[in-house]
Amino acid sequence: MVDSKAVVIRDTRGLVKMVVDASTGKILGVHIFAENAADIIHEAVLAVKYRMTIDHIIETVHVFPTMTRVDQASSDVFPEGPGPA
């Protein structure tokens, strides 16, 4: 999936990898490989620190278009989680 903002700035290189517990949907870790990774990792840090689930990220309203929306976009590939946390 390519982020709209990345297309606008003409730099679609990068990767977001989310490690999620399949039974609970809890986000265990996030890896971001991109030139601006330090600018967009903050939401992922909070998700891990506060033991959030993939559903929390999916349900969060993200301003559009921004590079930080890649966290939500990468979450969208997961099937619906185990339910409310």
Image: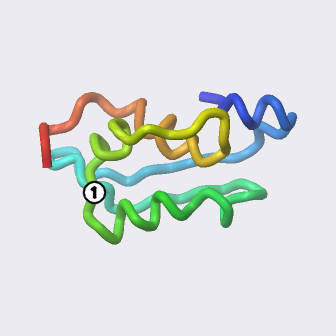
Colour setup of the view: rainbow
- Residue 66 percent across, percent down from the top left: 66, 41
- Residue 69 percent across, percent down from the top left: 56, 41
Kind of residue indicated by mark 1: Met
Counting other residues with Cα less than 10 Å from the Cα at mark 1, is it few (<14), some (14-19), or many (20 or more)? some
> Which residue is at the front of the view, 4 or 79?
4
Q: Residue at x 30, y 46 (%)?
A: 56
Q: Residue at x 23, y 47 (%)?
A: 25
Element carrying mark 1: loop
> Which residue is at the front of the view, 39 or 17?
39
Q: Which residue is mark 1?
A: 52
> Which residue is at the front of the view, 60 or 77?
60
**Residue 54's image quarter?**
top left
In this picture, residue 33 sits left or right of residue 8: left
Q: Against 32, is 64 above or below? A: above
Specify the quadrant that holds the N terminus: top right
In this picture, residue 15 sits left or right of residue 20: right
Q: Residue at x 13, y 38 (%)?
A: 82
User: In the orientation shown, which residue stands out farthest toward the bottom?
Assistant: 49
> Which residue is at the front of the view, 12 or 55?
55
**Residue 61's image quarter?**
top left
- Residue 12 percent across, percent down from the top left: 77, 37
- Residue 50 percent across, percent down from the top left: 29, 67
